[in-house]
Amino acid sequence: MEALLQMVQRHKAGEITGVYSVCSSHPLVIEASMRHALKQGETLVIEATSNQVNQDGGYTGMRPNDFCNLVFSIADTVGLPRNRVIMGGDHLGPNCWQDLTAEEAMQKSDILIAEYIKAGFRKIHLDCSMSCSDDPVPLGDDLVALRAARLCAVAEQTWQQVGGEAPVYIIGTEVPVPGGAQEGLDELTPTSVEAATETIAIHKHAFFDAGLKLTWPRIIALVVQPGVEFDHHKVMAFKPEKAQALSQNIENDPLMIYEAHSTDYQTAEHLADLVKGHFAILKVGPWLTYALREACWALDLIEQEWIEQANRANLKQTLLQAMQDKPVYWKKYYSQDTKEQALDCQYSLSDRIRYYWPQPEVTASLNKLIENLDNTPPPLTLVSQYLPNQYGAIVNGEIGTSTQELIFHKISEVLAQYSAACHSN
């Protein structure tokens, strides 16, 4: 955690520096991120969201300890030292249990936080902004802060029991919807200076009242809306001038920077502007699995042209069928129009395909695709046709020709933009 704390201190001292956080549970995305971090000499933040990973398994089927074991096993394989991996928990709170009463949901949240800390997660986003079944809508800041303080107290108590580095915390009530907006976007208004100032003040009061005064210096960031978001087919670009007052406001706080969610699909210039504007923790998730999907669709096309029909993995067909067989992860988000729905299921920027990679038949199909193209390597002309940037990397000697290297490189093209934004000095 020292690298993260030092980054915050350097940024507060005037250095244009930041960190990106990879919010994905896909092993290939995690490995690509680790290979990129190793090459760049970076400390890597990997985060799990509460709906991905929790005490009930989440949609990945993994509990917090399972996810940590997965991440560190990949780090060992890649050769990235474990002390250069920061484990983060995102949207930790009642998110998964909003249909329960507030007390029932908070009891579940207590267990969630404790399991995350026991497993080794040390960057903790406390998110109690959602209403439960017996709550008013929306919740007031006072109640959100009280619940966040309650969860922080559980985290601190658990950390003192298990030892290790002290956790750091992210707070904030203006939290974008995980995975992108569900409705079409026309305009976004950044968080007001007044709202940001009040959120910090209310949380500080709640934390001090809860006996967490000594913990407050480890509250390193506030989640706000800088004016960035994406929906199914459109990206709201960052406009520094609209967030100027918000950017300047955090300069008055000696401890905190901003954390920006939903920064996926921003341009390299906009990512750099976010870091310059003190939105120095950049969260990225769907863009990485979107890049994975783009690579896999291209590899599927190569397979169609290169591998005999009887031996093909047919990954694209398998994955889309899995989505139709179990539409729970996309049905309420996408259009009911047949043509639009077919487009959204494959190409929506919210990338709800990411929920289906853990399905056994999809995993098996992806593994077979990789095996097919590794055992019978396609000619580079086919790689050039469907993955031209990766072809260029092969020709330039940057990567080999294995199927996984093609996938890793495709994902790293996204990560490279975040590295440039966070290390512009």
Image: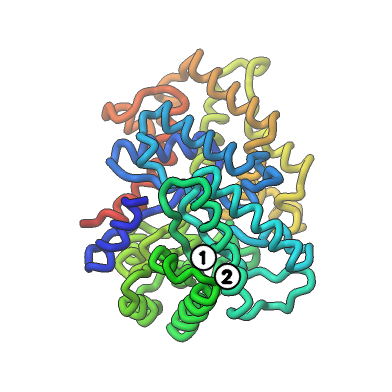
Q: Is residue 126 above or below residue 286?
A: below
The image shows a total of numbered marks equal to: 2
Q: Label 2: how many residues lie within 10 Å, few (<14), some (14-19) or many (20+)?
A: some
Q: Are marks 2 and 1 in contact (CB under 8 Å)?
A: yes
Regarding mark 1 in the picture, which secondary structure is present there?
strand
Report whether 347 appears left or right of 16: right
Q: Label 1: how many residues lie within 10 Å, few (<14), some (14-19) or many (20+)?
A: many
Near-viewer residue (184 or 127):
127
Residue pointed to by mark 1: 229
| Position in image of residue 299 (x %, y %) | 52, 30
Instruction: Point out which mark residue 312 bears.
Output: none
Residue drawn at (27%, 26%) of the image = 397
| Position in image of residue 209 (x %, y %) | 53, 76
Near-viewer residue (189 or 151):
151
| Position in image of residue 190 (x %, y %) | 47, 77
Residue drawn at (50%, 79%) of the image = 205
Q: How far separated are the C-alphas under marks 2 and 1?
A: 8 Å
Report the mark closest to the observer, 2 or 1. 1
Q: Is residue 129 above or below residue 267?
A: below
Q: Residue furthest top?
A: 375
What kind of residue is marked 1?
Glu
Name the image colouring: rainbow
| Position in image of residue 79 (x %, y %) | 36, 29
Near-viewer residue (302 or 189):
189
Q: Is residue 202 above or below residue 290?
A: below
Instruction: Point out which mark residue 185 bears.
Output: 2
Please identify the quarter of the rendering in which residue 154 is found.
Answer: bottom right
What kind of residue is marked 2?
Leu
- In the picture, the quarter occupied by the C terminus is bottom left
Q: Is residue 272 above or below residue 140?
A: above
Regarding mark 2 in the picture, which secondary structure is present there?
loop
